[in-house]
Amino acid sequence: MSKESISIRPEEQIRLLLRENELLNSIIQGASDSIYAKDLEGRYISINEACAAYFGKRIDEIIGRTDVELLGHFPVKKIVESDAKLFESGNSVSYENRGTFGVGNSYFSTTKSPLQDANGNLIGLIGISRDVTAARLSEEKYRFIFDNAPFSFWEEDFSQVKKFLDARKAEGVLDLKTYFLENPSQLERCIDLIEVKNVNRATLVMNGVEDKAAFIKKIHRNFTPDSESIFLNEFVALSEGKTYFQAEGSFVNVNDDTIDVQFNLNVLPGHEEDLSLVLVSIANITDTHRLADELNTIKHRYQSIVEAQSEMICRISPTRKVIFRNLAFTRFFKFKDSGLETRFPSLFPPSELEKCEREMQLITARDPKRVCELRNYDQDGNLIWQEWNVTAFFGNSGTLLGYQAVGNDVTSRKLAQEALASSEARWRSIFEHADDLILTVNSEGYILSVNDYLELPKDRKWAGRTLEEVMLPENSQAAMELVNQVFATGKPIKTELRILRRQDGQYSTYGVALSPIYHGNRVITAICIARNISETKEFEKHHREALIEGQENERMRVAQELHDGLGQLFTAIKLNLQHLKSGIGKRGSSDDMNERIRALEDNIGVAITEVKNISRNLMPDVLWQFGLKPAVQDLVEKWNTTGEFEISLELVDMDIRFAPELEKALFRMCQELVNNSIRHGNASNVYVQLINHGNSIVLMVEDDGIGFDPDKTSQGFGLRNIWSRAEVFEGRVEIDSKPKKGTVTTVEIPLTNSLKQ
């Protein structure tokens, strides 16, 4: 019997159909997706348990009712619109919606298909809705993390790159790296095939842009040319099937700032075959590189500084072995140091070794530093003293990590300390027996110490008493004002103070110097040194008088020259004029008249010459027009024309001009000293020297004359005039002379800015 002849009885067909219907209904009811059917009015005509569960109702409570009746108008707006769209077009629709149903807020992916009868007429729809809440929440979480990550992320599609790489393999390209190096245009083409899907906020901030869409189009063009190797190596890695790639490079943002980055590429799971979704992360390592460079620079600088130090520097292990030494350390200990096995204490003599060990044992985590002085010997066997600053380093747990020791040669200091100690008694002796008054005073005027000054009354003790108690009121008030000024300003003071003498009611003048003594930043004491300068002031007074007397003598000399020279000449001129007047109108010899006129002319010429000579003596033309050097040269030249004596002149750095009053004073002193040597010293040879030392100018006049005793000659020879002129400029005069030994006079004038021109 053939298969075609076999027929199924109707009751069997019904049974089979019922069985298939039960099976289908069982599958529908057991499905996790929501499956339902609606008529053209939107009423549910079939629904499975999963769908009813989302409504929070039983199936019999849903059948025959619409979505609006079950949920209200607003929540089902999109559902009703999609149903209407299907009923109008007769085509399937798919969409995703988010709704609040009986079990809460959920995401659904829905597909609706038309339901037709046997004749193909549309009688409703069949819908399948899948709950994609977990997937959507996961995606939202991913998007949130992606957008708000603290470092740069972007998503890329490498599917076109994958096709390009596969095509190259199909063409027989085995070494892709060499291929790109030889065909850079192909590398550019491959870079252009990368499609950037999205970038996060950190990427936009790093690049200094706000327009995401415009930036995405050119993101790969921001990388510097030096970073093209990143893309080359990236393509090679992907062609080899790798799903992860990392490299370092740099790119330029819109502000033209070059940023160093670490580039990470990950092919997301499920996209390994087509590379359609690749996640790229960029970490800004500009600061890291800069910090590394700075640390490296600091390291080299530290090493160079350590090596350049004159101090001996070494690092010591916890077992006290020397593990690092700088050049200064090596130079000194090279005759003792045997390398890495050398223990630090063993570098010192046996007598100091125990002391060194003991000092290092006292170092703890709470007190990690020790300073000790140790004796040692250099390679020549000389005894020296060294000061070592030893610092220990401990870990967080208190474990000793090692030491650093810095040593200095303090031999000179030790010797100085010994010298200071031995000289303290000598200093005290000087303090006690000084010719000046020396005392220390506190801020309240109490005298803390005072030396045994000759002029202090022996029946009264000053130490421990105030200035007001030991001095007359007007004296103590003036002294206290100076003390207060020192404490207020913290600066030394030099001044003069007139002191009323108690014994005779007369005044003495003292030169006073007060200086502050500090403790830290605070003035605690003032030290005062006072010297009686009454005699000096009296001497200054005599000098001023001598200067005035010199000026008067100069006036008398000029008057005498005018009287003796010009007076006689003008008298002769007057007589000649009278003779000429009496001869006018009378007959007389014309020769006699002419002779008188010639005599008159001669007398007038002599008078003019005399006036010029007097003027030159007062202020030579050469001096005020050309300066000191030409004036002195002219003066010496005129003296030498007499032939009676010889004057030698040496000028050093005298080409510059000085203040007019200084040039005039030096010229007059030179003129006076040479005159003294010739007229009073009977010298045959005179040596004149003018030297500009920069900070002072020195005039020296030396002769081979008869000399004199300076101690016994207080005036005469114009010396008082010399002293007075020098004193005006705070200069000094030294005279070296003995009878029959000649004379050397030296005048030194300090050059202040006001005396330079």
Image (cartoon, rainbow, N blue to C red):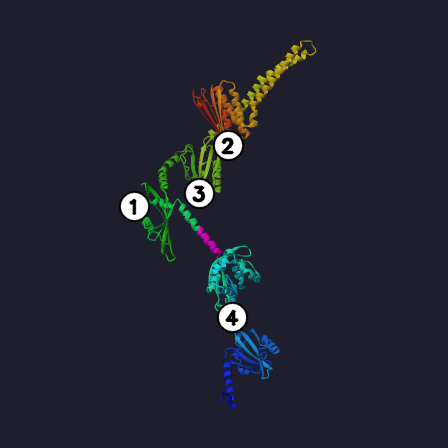
* Mark in the foreground, 1 or 3: 1
For the residue pair 212 and 8, the one nearer the viewer reads as 8
Query: Of the residues under marks 2 and 3, which one precedes in the sequence?
Result: 3
Task: Name the residue carrying label 4.
Answer: 137
To which residue does mark 2 refer?
Answer: 751
Q: Nearer the viewer, mark 2 or mark 4?
A: 4
Question: What distance separates the C-alpha of mark 2 from that of mark 4?
Answer: 93 Å
- First-in-chain label (2 vs 4): 4
Q: Mark 2 touching mark 3, by CB under 8 A?
A: no
SS assignment for the magenta stretch, majority: helix
User: What residue is disc 3 on?
Assistant: 518
Task: Give residue 187's position: percent from left, percent from top.
Answer: 51, 60
Q: Are marks 1 and 3 in contact (CB under 8 Å)?
A: no
Asked if residue 366 shows in the view, the reply is no
x and y, in percent, of residue 11 in the image: 51, 90
Q: CA distance from mark 2 to mark 3?
A: 34 Å
Q: Is residue 703 left or right of residue 415?
A: right
Residue ranking furthest to the left: 350
Instruction: Read off the magenta span.
Output: 285-297
Q: Earlier in the sequence, mark 1 or mark 3?
A: 1
Closer to us: mark 3 or mark 4? Answer: 4
Residue type, mark 4 in image: Leu
Q: Measuring 38% from the left and 47% from the top, which residue is drawn there?
A: 326
The residue under label 2 is which amino acid type?
Answer: Leu
Local packing at callout 4 (Cα closer than 10 Å; few below 14, some 14-19, many 20+) is few
Q: Identify residue type, mark 3.
A: Tyr
Q: Quadrant of the C terminus?
A: top right
